[in-house]
Image (cartoon, helix red, strand yellow):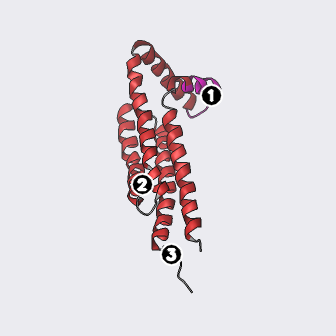
Amino acid sequence: MQNRRQLKQSIRRWLLFFIVALILSGVTAFALETELAWLNRVLPEDGIGLHTWITKVYLALKATNEKYPFMAYGYDWLAFAHLVIAVAFIGPYADPVKNVWIIQFGMIACVMIFPLAFAAGYIRGIPFYWQLIDCSFGVGGFICLFVCFRKIKMLAAMPSVPPTK
């Protein structure tokens, strides 16, 4: 059985991974056209149409940025939202038991990715396999946060001060 210190360290490691993943996924929204241009160059032709889809998205984004650069402002706000959400998880990092509600909020948000990805993806003509890629972020995030949630519940059940002999 883990002691309080080990359990808290484990929670912090999981949360740090989650925070870094949120930051990285947010930061990538700032330079989306550059990233898609690179991906378009290095991605081999495949049988499932991934290269075709990336090319289509890249060309659409490039054309939009050339004619209407202000539209990229939406991606800036998307990136900002990821960074702000990452900051919220500093609370559970500092005091997991007190801030367990933020973990619960995060798990709910991860589950909410599914209806959005499938409904909006269908309406917007996003290929199904890409909708699944989007959903994988919800799966990965949920697993990470659920592990934290379980460990926080274990931590909360432990006595704060070890019993004296």
Above or below: residue 125 compared with residue 3: above
- Badges 3 and 2: C-beta atoms under 8 Å apart? no
Q: Which residue is mark 1?
A: 45
Mark 3 or 2: the one toward you:
3
Q: Which quadrant would the N terminus be assigned to in this image?
A: bottom right
- At which x and y percent is residue 90? 47, 50
Tell me how far mark 1 sits from mark 3, CA to CA.
60 Å
Name the one closer to the observer, 44 or 154.
154
Asked if the magenta segment contains residue 131, the reply would be no
Amino acid of disc 2:
Met
Amino acid of disc 3:
Val
Asked if the magenta segment contains residue 41, the reply would be yes
- At which x and y percent is residue 17? 56, 49
Label of residue 107 in the image = 2
- At which x and y percent is residue 138? 46, 48
Tell me how far mark 3 sits from mark 2, CA to CA.
30 Å
Amino acid of disc 1:
Glu
- At which x and y percent is residue 100? 41, 60
Q: Which quadrant would the C terminus be assigned to in this image?
A: bottom right
Number of callouts:
3
Residue located 45% across and 45% down the image: 87
Magenta range is 35-49
Q: Which residue is mark 3?
A: 161
- Badges 1 and 2: C-beta atoms under 8 Å apart? no
| Local secondary structure at mark 2 | helix
| Local secondary structure at mark 1 | loop
Label of residue 68 in the image = none
Query: Badge 3: few (under 14), some or many (20 or more) residues near its Cα, within 10 Å?
Result: few
